[in-house]
Amino acid sequence: MPDDAPPPPPSDSGPKSTGLPSNIAAALACIPLIGGIVFFILEKHDSFVRFYSMQSIILGGAWLLFSIAESIVGLIFRSIPVIAGVLDFFWGIIVAMVNIAFVVLWIIATVKAFTGARWEIPYVGPMARKQVGES
């Protein structure tokens, strides 16, 4: 076993409810909404995993709400006869950019969780920390 092995991810010293290493469980918890809900329910002891689970729930919920609002606004834009094409085109660009931002945040959070680093998604991280009882 080499001496230059990376240190284990920071976590509580208590037992793990899932039986998975903290970094693996936290990375799986980063799957928006579903992964977060599953690991938030399953993991009761590891604050590292619970934090990433709550971030996933909040980010996934925001992504879901954005998708619903995007569909409604897109439907309204397509119903305007004179400028429907132009509005729909620009709205499509905005929607694509926002979705790319969500995917980038998801990937960064997953990589950070897998490497054992505690990373707060802007705006989402403080809300997640508050929800899991960390100050």
Image (cartoon, helix red, strand yellow):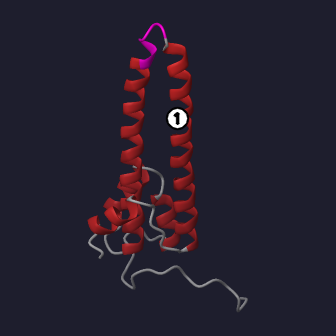
Residue at (52% x, 61% y) in the render: 109
Q: Which residues are magenta?
A: 77-82
Task: Examine the structure image and report whether residue 18 is included in the region drawn in magenta.
Answer: no
Give amino acid for label 1.
Ile
Q: Is residue 45 above or below residue 94?
A: below
Q: Is residue 83 above or below residue 47?
A: above
Residue at (33% x, 68% y) in the render: 129
Q: Residue 97 in the image: x percent, y percent?
A: 56, 40
The front one of 8 and 124 is 124
Task: Examine the structure image and report whether residue 79 is included in the region drawn in magenta.
Answer: yes
Q: Quadrant of the N terminus?
A: bottom right
For numbered disc 1, what is the local secondary structure? helix
The front one of 56 and 4 is 56
Q: Residue 29 in the image: x percent, y percent?
A: 45, 59
Q: Which residue lies most toward the right here?
A: 2
Residue at (54% x, 48% y) in the render: 101
